[in-house]
Protein backbone atom coordinates (compact mmCIF):
# COMPACT_ATOMS: atom_id res chain seq x y z
CA UNK A 1 0.00 0.00 0.00
CA UNK A 2 1.43 3.38 -1.02
CA UNK A 3 1.34 6.61 0.95
CA UNK A 4 -1.44 8.00 -1.24
CA UNK A 5 -3.64 4.89 -1.21
CA UNK A 6 -3.16 4.62 2.60
CA UNK A 7 -4.31 8.22 3.01
CA UNK A 8 -7.48 7.63 0.95
CA UNK A 9 -8.10 4.33 2.76
CA UNK A 10 -7.88 6.02 6.18
CA UNK A 11 -10.26 8.80 5.17
CA UNK A 12 -12.82 6.24 3.97
CA UNK A 13 -12.45 4.20 7.18
CA UNK A 14 -12.96 7.32 9.31
CA UNK A 15 -16.31 8.07 7.70
CA UNK A 16 -17.26 4.39 7.83
CA UNK A 17 -16.71 4.27 11.60
CA UNK A 18 -18.53 7.54 12.20
CA UNK A 19 -21.49 6.27 10.16
CA UNK A 20 -21.46 2.90 11.92
CA UNK A 21 -21.40 4.56 15.33
CA UNK A 22 -24.34 6.78 14.31
CA UNK A 23 -26.41 3.74 13.25
CA UNK A 24 -25.45 1.87 16.45
CA UNK A 25 -26.63 4.65 18.79
CA UNK A 26 -29.83 5.20 16.79
CA UNK A 27 -30.48 1.45 17.06
CA UNK A 28 -30.11 1.55 20.84
CA UNK A 29 -32.48 4.51 20.99
CA UNK A 30 -35.05 2.66 18.93
CA UNK A 31 -34.88 -0.42 21.21
CA UNK A 32 -35.39 1.66 24.35
CA UNK A 33 -38.17 3.71 22.78
CA UNK A 34 -40.03 0.48 21.94
CA UNK A 35 -39.57 -1.01 25.42
CA UNK A 36 -40.67 2.16 27.24
CA UNK A 37 -43.21 3.37 24.65
CA UNK A 38 -41.34 6.66 24.76
CA UNK A 39 -40.49 7.97 21.25
CA UNK A 40 -38.49 10.81 22.80
CA UNK A 41 -35.69 8.34 23.48
CA UNK A 42 -35.22 7.85 19.76
CA UNK A 43 -34.86 11.60 19.26
CA UNK A 44 -32.45 11.71 22.20
CA UNK A 45 -30.34 8.95 20.65
CA UNK A 46 -30.26 10.88 17.38
CA UNK A 47 -28.89 14.00 19.06
CA UNK A 48 -26.37 11.96 21.09
CA UNK A 49 -25.12 10.25 17.91
CA UNK A 50 -24.82 13.53 16.04
CA UNK A 51 -23.12 15.18 19.03
CA UNK A 52 -20.59 12.39 19.54
CA UNK A 53 -19.71 12.28 15.84
CA UNK A 54 -19.24 16.05 15.87
CA UNK A 55 -17.07 15.90 19.00
CA UNK A 56 -15.07 12.94 17.65
CA UNK A 57 -14.26 14.70 14.40
CA UNK A 58 -13.52 18.18 15.73
CA UNK A 59 -12.18 17.60 19.25
CA UNK A 60 -10.91 14.01 19.42
CA UNK A 61 -7.30 15.23 19.33
CA UNK A 62 -7.85 17.54 22.31
CA UNK A 63 -9.52 14.73 24.24
CA UNK A 64 -6.59 12.37 23.59
CA UNK A 65 -4.08 15.04 24.63
CA UNK A 66 -6.09 15.65 27.82
CA UNK A 67 -6.22 11.90 28.59
CA UNK A 68 -2.45 11.74 28.05
CA UNK A 69 -1.84 14.78 30.28
CA UNK A 70 0.22 16.34 27.47
CA UNK A 71 1.29 19.98 27.70
CA UNK A 72 2.24 22.19 24.76
CA UNK A 73 5.83 23.41 24.58
CA UNK A 74 7.10 26.50 22.79
CA UNK A 75 9.92 26.95 20.26
CA UNK A 76 11.65 29.24 22.76
CA UNK A 77 11.77 26.63 25.54
CA UNK A 78 12.69 23.65 23.32
CA UNK A 79 14.62 25.08 20.39
CA UNK A 80 16.45 21.87 19.49
CA UNK A 81 13.26 19.79 19.21
CA UNK A 82 11.50 22.41 17.12
CA UNK A 83 14.53 22.68 14.86
CA UNK A 84 14.44 18.93 14.24
CA UNK A 85 10.72 19.01 13.49
CA UNK A 86 10.94 22.05 11.22
CA UNK A 87 13.76 20.55 9.13
CA UNK A 88 11.87 17.28 8.69
CA UNK A 89 8.65 19.11 7.80
CA UNK A 90 10.45 21.06 5.08
CA UNK A 91 11.71 17.77 3.62
CA UNK A 92 8.29 16.10 3.90
CA UNK A 93 6.36 19.12 2.61
CA UNK A 94 4.19 19.28 5.75
CA UNK A 95 3.15 22.20 7.98
CA UNK A 96 5.04 22.34 11.29
CA UNK A 97 2.80 20.69 13.92
CA UNK A 98 2.44 21.79 17.52
CA UNK A 99 4.59 19.81 19.93
CA UNK A 100 3.36 18.52 23.27
CA UNK A 101 5.33 16.98 26.12
CA UNK A 102 4.10 14.17 28.38
CA UNK A 103 5.60 14.22 31.88
CA UNK A 104 6.52 10.53 32.01
CA UNK A 105 9.91 8.83 32.05
CA UNK A 106 8.79 5.96 29.80
CA UNK A 107 10.01 6.66 26.23
CA UNK A 108 7.22 6.87 23.64
CA UNK A 109 5.47 9.19 21.20
CA UNK A 110 2.31 9.64 19.15
CA UNK A 111 0.75 12.04 16.65
CA UNK A 112 -2.83 13.31 16.58
CA UNK A 113 -5.05 15.86 14.84
CA UNK A 114 -7.74 15.83 12.15
CA UNK A 115 -5.45 17.00 9.31
CA UNK A 116 -1.83 18.11 8.72
CA UNK A 117 -2.74 21.74 9.39
CA UNK A 118 -4.10 20.85 12.86
CA UNK A 119 -1.58 18.14 13.68
CA UNK A 120 0.18 17.60 16.98
CA UNK A 121 3.16 15.46 17.97
CA UNK A 122 3.35 14.31 21.59
CA UNK A 123 6.67 13.15 23.06
CA UNK A 124 7.38 11.83 26.53
CA UNK A 125 10.15 13.27 28.70
CA UNK A 126 11.63 9.79 28.78
CA UNK A 127 11.97 9.79 25.00
CA UNK A 128 13.96 13.04 25.05
CA UNK A 129 16.17 11.80 27.87
CA UNK A 130 16.91 8.28 26.62
CA UNK A 131 17.34 8.64 22.86
CA UNK A 132 20.24 10.09 20.95
CA UNK A 133 19.61 12.92 18.50
CA UNK A 134 19.51 10.72 15.37
CA UNK A 135 17.12 8.30 17.11
CA UNK A 136 14.83 11.11 18.26
CA UNK A 137 14.83 12.53 14.74
CA UNK A 138 13.82 9.11 13.39
CA UNK A 139 10.90 8.83 15.83
CA UNK A 140 9.67 12.31 14.87
CA UNK A 141 9.96 11.38 11.18
CA UNK A 142 7.83 8.29 11.85
CA UNK A 143 5.13 10.42 13.48
CA UNK A 144 5.24 12.95 10.65
CA UNK A 145 4.59 10.05 8.26
CA UNK A 146 1.44 9.20 10.23
CA UNK A 147 0.38 12.83 9.82
CA UNK A 148 1.02 12.75 6.09
CA UNK A 149 -1.11 9.65 5.43
CA UNK A 150 -4.00 10.68 7.76
CA UNK A 151 -3.50 7.87 10.29
CA UNK A 152 -3.91 10.49 13.00
CA UNK A 153 -7.57 11.33 12.34
CA UNK A 154 -8.66 7.71 12.19
CA UNK A 155 -6.73 6.79 15.34
CA UNK A 156 -8.08 9.62 17.49
CA UNK A 157 -11.69 9.24 16.31
CA UNK A 158 -11.60 5.55 17.19
CA UNK A 159 -10.19 6.32 20.65
CA UNK A 160 -13.14 8.60 21.48
CA UNK A 161 -15.84 6.32 20.03
CA UNK A 162 -14.52 3.22 21.80
CA UNK A 163 -14.32 5.17 25.06
CA UNK A 164 -17.94 6.27 24.68
CA UNK A 165 -19.08 2.66 24.16
CA UNK A 166 -17.31 1.76 27.44
CA UNK A 167 -19.11 4.62 29.22
CA UNK A 168 -22.48 3.42 27.88
CA UNK A 169 -21.77 -0.04 29.24
CA UNK A 170 -20.97 1.37 32.68
CA UNK A 171 -24.09 3.57 32.67
CA UNK A 172 -26.41 0.70 31.78
CA UNK A 173 -24.94 -1.52 34.50
CA UNK A 174 -25.30 1.21 37.15
CA UNK A 175 -28.88 1.99 36.08
CA UNK A 176 -29.99 -1.62 36.42
CA UNK A 177 -28.32 -1.98 39.84
CA UNK A 178 -29.72 1.20 41.40
CA UNK A 179 -33.20 1.20 39.88
CA UNK A 180 -35.15 -1.22 42.11
CA UNK A 181 -38.72 -0.50 41.02
CA UNK A 182 -40.81 -3.67 40.50
CA UNK A 183 -43.52 -2.40 38.14
CA UNK A 184 -43.90 -4.53 35.00
CA UNK A 185 -42.81 -1.89 32.50
CA UNK A 186 -39.72 -0.96 34.50
CA UNK A 187 -38.79 -4.61 35.06
CA UNK A 188 -38.98 -5.16 31.32
CA UNK A 189 -36.72 -2.15 30.75
CA UNK A 190 -34.27 -3.37 33.37
CA UNK A 191 -34.07 -6.76 31.63
CA UNK A 192 -33.36 -5.11 28.28
CA UNK A 193 -30.76 -2.83 29.87
CA UNK A 194 -29.09 -5.80 31.55
CA UNK A 195 -28.84 -7.57 28.19
CA UNK A 196 -27.50 -4.43 26.49
CA UNK A 197 -25.07 -3.80 29.36
CA UNK A 198 -23.62 -7.30 29.14
CA UNK A 199 -23.42 -6.98 25.36
CA UNK A 200 -21.60 -3.63 25.64
CA UNK A 201 -19.32 -4.90 28.41
CA UNK A 202 -18.18 -7.62 25.99
CA UNK A 203 -18.24 -5.31 22.99
CA UNK A 204 -16.22 -2.44 24.48
CA UNK A 205 -12.83 -4.20 24.76
CA UNK A 206 -13.49 -6.27 21.65
CA UNK A 207 -14.47 -3.17 19.67
CA UNK A 208 -11.35 -1.39 20.88
CA UNK A 209 -9.16 -4.18 19.57
CA UNK A 210 -11.01 -4.88 16.33
CA UNK A 211 -11.36 -1.21 15.40
CA UNK A 212 -7.70 -0.61 16.11
CA UNK A 213 -6.77 -3.67 14.04
CA UNK A 214 -8.98 -2.37 11.23
CA UNK A 215 -6.65 0.61 11.03
CA UNK A 216 -4.18 -2.11 10.03
CA UNK A 217 -0.77 -2.88 11.43
CA UNK A 218 0.51 -2.13 7.93
CA UNK A 219 0.30 1.55 8.82
CA UNK A 220 3.22 1.09 11.24
CA UNK A 221 5.35 -0.61 8.60
CA UNK A 222 4.48 2.14 6.14
CA UNK A 223 5.27 4.91 8.65
CA UNK A 224 8.56 3.16 9.52
CA UNK A 225 9.57 3.02 5.86
CA UNK A 226 8.48 6.60 5.11
CA UNK A 227 10.18 7.89 8.25
CA UNK A 228 13.42 6.10 7.34
CA UNK A 229 13.30 7.57 3.83
CA UNK A 230 12.72 11.00 5.32
CA UNK A 231 15.85 10.87 7.49
CA UNK A 232 17.89 8.74 5.03
CA UNK A 233 18.99 6.77 8.09
CA UNK A 234 16.96 3.57 8.75
CA UNK A 235 19.32 2.52 11.55
CA UNK A 236 18.22 5.55 13.59
CA UNK A 237 14.63 4.31 13.82
CA UNK A 238 15.68 0.69 14.27
CA UNK A 239 17.86 1.67 17.22
CA UNK A 240 15.09 3.87 18.67
CA UNK A 241 12.56 1.03 18.47
CA UNK A 242 15.01 -1.28 20.24
CA UNK A 243 15.48 1.17 23.10
CA UNK A 244 11.78 2.01 23.48
CA UNK A 245 10.65 -1.63 23.44
CA UNK A 246 13.43 -2.72 25.82
CA UNK A 247 12.57 -0.02 28.37
CA UNK A 248 10.78 -1.61 31.34
CA UNK A 249 8.89 1.46 32.53
CA UNK A 250 5.12 1.55 32.00
CA UNK A 251 3.61 4.67 30.48
CA UNK A 252 1.11 5.57 33.22
CA UNK A 253 -1.18 7.76 31.07
CA UNK A 254 -1.71 5.10 28.38
CA UNK A 255 -4.71 2.76 28.29
CA UNK A 256 -6.26 0.21 25.94
CA UNK A 257 -8.15 2.92 24.03
CA UNK A 258 -5.03 5.00 23.30
CA UNK A 259 -2.32 2.31 23.11
CA UNK A 260 -2.62 1.90 19.33
CA UNK A 261 -1.61 5.54 18.79
CA UNK A 262 1.91 5.21 20.19
CA UNK A 263 4.96 4.28 18.14
CA UNK A 264 5.49 1.24 20.41
CA UNK A 265 2.76 -0.47 22.46
CA UNK A 266 3.01 1.33 25.84
CA UNK A 267 1.25 -1.46 27.79
CA UNK A 268 4.35 -3.37 28.82
CA UNK A 269 4.18 -7.02 29.73
CA UNK A 270 0.92 -7.64 27.83
CA UNK A 271 2.16 -9.04 24.55
CA UNK A 272 0.50 -12.43 24.93
CA UNK A 273 1.03 -15.48 22.79
CA UNK A 274 -0.82 -17.75 20.41
CA UNK A 275 -4.25 -16.36 19.47
CA UNK A 276 -3.55 -13.16 21.44
CA UNK A 277 -0.87 -12.21 18.91
CA UNK A 278 -3.55 -11.96 16.25
CA UNK A 279 -5.09 -9.07 18.21
CA UNK A 280 -1.92 -7.04 18.72
CA UNK A 281 -2.36 -3.40 17.71
CA UNK A 282 1.32 -3.15 16.68
CA UNK A 283 3.37 -5.49 14.49
CA UNK A 284 6.21 -7.33 16.28
CA UNK A 285 9.11 -4.99 17.05
CA UNK A 286 11.58 -7.60 15.82
CA UNK A 287 10.00 -7.60 12.36
CA UNK A 288 9.87 -3.80 12.20
CA UNK A 289 13.56 -3.60 13.08
CA UNK A 290 14.43 -6.35 10.58
CA UNK A 291 12.67 -4.48 7.76
CA UNK A 292 14.36 -1.20 8.65
CA UNK A 293 17.82 -2.73 8.68
CA UNK A 294 17.11 -4.43 5.37
CA UNK A 295 16.54 -0.94 3.92
CA UNK A 296 20.06 0.04 4.90
CA UNK A 297 21.69 -2.83 2.99
Image: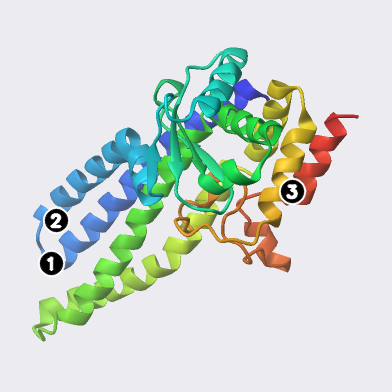
Residue pointed to by mark 1: 36
Determine the secondary structure under disc 1: helix
The x and y percentages for residue 246 are 71, 56
Label 1–label 2 contact, CB within 8 A:
yes
> Looking at the rendered structure, which numbered label has been put on residue 250?
none
Residue pointed to by mark 3: 242
Residue in the image at 45% along x and 46% along y: 102
Residue 13 makes an appearance in the image: no
Task: Check the picture and name the quadrant holding the N terminus.
Answer: top right
Determine the secondary structure under disc 3: helix
Q: Please tell me whether mark 3 or mark 1 is closer to you in this view.
A: 3
What's the coloring here?
Answer: rainbow
Determine the secondary structure under disc 2: helix
Real-space CA distance between mark 1 and mark 2, rounded to the nearest whole angstrom = 9 Å
Q: Earlier in the sequence, mark 1 or mark 2?
A: 1
The x and y percentages for residue 73 are 40, 33
Label 3–label 2 contact, CB within 8 A:
no
Amino acid sequence: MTLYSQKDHNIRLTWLYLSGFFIFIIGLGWIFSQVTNNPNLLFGAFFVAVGMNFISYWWSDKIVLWISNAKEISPESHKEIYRLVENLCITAGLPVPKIYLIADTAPNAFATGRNPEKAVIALTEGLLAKLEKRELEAVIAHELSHIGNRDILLGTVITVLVGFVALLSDWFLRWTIWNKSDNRENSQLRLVLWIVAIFLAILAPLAATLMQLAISRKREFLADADGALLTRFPEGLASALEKISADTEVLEVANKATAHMYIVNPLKGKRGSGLAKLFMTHPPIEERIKRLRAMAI
